Amino acid sequence: MTFAIHGLAVARGIAIGRAVLLAASHLDVAHYFIQPEQVPAEIERVRNGRNAVVQELQRLQVEMPPDAPAELTALLDVHLMLLQDETLVAGIKHWISERLYNAEWALVTQLEVISRQFDEMEDDYLRERKADLEQVVERILRYMKGVASPVAAPPPPAPTAAGQQELLPGDGTDVPLVLVANDLAPADLLQFKQSVFAGFVTDVGGKTSHTAIVARSMDIPAVVGARAASQLVRQDDWVIIDGDAGVLIVDPSPIILAEYGFRQRQIELERERLIRLRHTPAVTIDGHKVELLANIEQPADAAAAVRAGAVGVGLFRTEFLFMGKGSHLPGEEEQYQAYRQVIEGMQGLPVTIRTIDVGADKPLEKGHKDDHLNPALGLRAIRWSLADPVMFRTQLRAVLRAAAHGRVNLLFPMIAHVSEIHQALAQVDLARAELDARGVAYGPVRLGAMIEVPAAALLARRFLHYFDYLSIGTNDLIQYALAIDRADESVAHLYDPLHPAVLRLVADVIAAGAELGKSVSVCGEVAGDVAMTRLLLGLGLRSFSMHPAQILAVKQELLRADTRKLVPWAQQVLESDDPAQAMEVLAMAQEKSASSY
Ligand code: PEP
Ligand code: MG
């Protein structure tokens, strides 16, 4: 039966496909598609794992001392019974041969399916057997990882890719797949970048959570904050993600499917139309040149930025180079290569490299939630870097060296105090001195600060004495100005880029830049929101940085804009108690007067 689950719209478009439920994170396994010819070998791997556990348990049964508690014997019986159960075996074979999942993925998928059946049981005793099933599956997984005795020892660190959730493309399935999970760390999502997933849905998360941001950068439809989606959707259900409305439709009827199929084709046509704007200069009707830059998370994203016609990278979120790497954080050389790759990929266009911004909803380690009392207000961004100057200078040296290969802007996240400016700049000087001492070449960098906390916005003029440019991070600025955790769906309705206080802060920073003749850009999500383009232009913004996928839509908007009309209009919006309503009313009035504004 068709039903809909409502969440938050975070990445636009329509995805239609079968649901892949990501298993509970404590059974953290590799996920990838196999080739059809690998099916027998994958089935064999599970079979071997299962047989080994059966033998192990049978041995334990035999060796059980006569005075062993009866519960223990009963438990072994239950585990053996579960292991030999046909539903488990048949299901695993199905996922491997029909969906081409790797053995571990098939195993946890089937675990999920059977767990649901247990959950629905009336009988308490049977319902509780779910935990036994999980233990049994865990044992098989350990055997498959090559652990000699699953009873004796915890699993060793996973070899290479195992243990990381890898979802890499395979040519095995034509059915579009849609990922449904309780939560996904930004680092998980990064691994999906080249995956076959057509969209994703999570139970938790806010509009500007980093998981949502990565989804937008992947340009696949996504809905977050869909509360119980991962409970209500079953493995392999047909689902539709409406990324514009923030809705997940489960088990759609043929009529609904046809309707969404039609809309999907319309969106495709609109995209093709926009591509024609790629080489069109971004200039308003009245001749103002506007800079459209790209936000990227990985060196490989530079290609998408160039393809979209970006005139540079306005924000390289370097923390993604560090995430999910365990204790092997990238050193100076590895970072230098990554930055150089972006600079060269951008073919002479400027690249803004932001120093590492971990903490809050971007933990270094996937699955490790920041357990500080209040992570968004804790040790993150520049605070984290200044707390570890050795790590910080390693990054600075890598950036300075890469700057020898092209135009580089260095950007510090979340600066709030003038003392932090002094410390950060002193570290840059030290990094240069260290390179000098080693006789290593480096290039010049323009220095900039992100304006992400209200305190910084209020001090923008003062900050500009130290910096060449500012970049407004509206995601955090809104979070801190309105005191809402950007990753928390329960306060997501309070996230409001049009809050008069937010607009005032943004307008003041733009005005400060204009007064002092220094550039100010916006690199938060509002920069890529076409509903905000005219207002930002009216407030004087001439530099926007966004996901490459949004660049052409924003360009289309500004090509139709006339700042001579937008400036007075934006001032009226700024003065209003209800800017959202004022925007609507004034836009309607402008339309009536039939003039382009
Ligand atoms: C922001 O806060 O607006 C920003 C661009 O930085 P991030 O989203 O990476 O925190
Ligand atoms: Mg930020």
Image: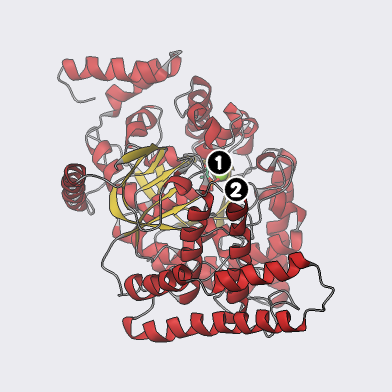
Q: Is residue 428 above or below residue 378?
A: below
User: What is the tally of numbered marks visible in this picture?
Assistant: 2
Which quarter of the rendered image does ligand 2 occupy? top right
Per the image, label 2 sits on a secondary structure element best described as loop
- In which image quadrant can residue 32 be found? bottom left
Q: Amino acid at mark 1?
A: Ala
Read off the residue under disc 1.
487
Secondary structure state at the residue bearing disc 1: loop
Q: In the rendered structure, are the residues bearing label 1 and label 2 in contact, judged by CB atoms less than 8 Å apart?
A: yes
Q: Which residue is mark 2?
A: 361
Q: Position of residue 470 (x, y in %)?
A: 53, 42
Q: Nearer the viewer, residue 177 or 273?
A: 177
| Residue 230 percent across, percent down from the top left | 47, 49
Q: In percent of the image, x 57 and y 49: which residue is there?
A: 123
Label 1 C-beta lies within 8 Å of the nearest ligand 1 atom: no
Q: Nearer the viewer, residue 317 or 28?
A: 28
Pointer 2 local density, CA inside 10 Å: few below 14, some 14–19, many at least 20: many
Q: Position of residue 97 (x, y in %)?
A: 35, 76
Image check: 591 left or right of 1? left
Placement of the C terminus among the 4 image quadrants: top left
**Number of residues whose C-alpha sits closer than 10 Å to that of mark 1, classed few (under 14), some (14–19) or many (20 or more):** many
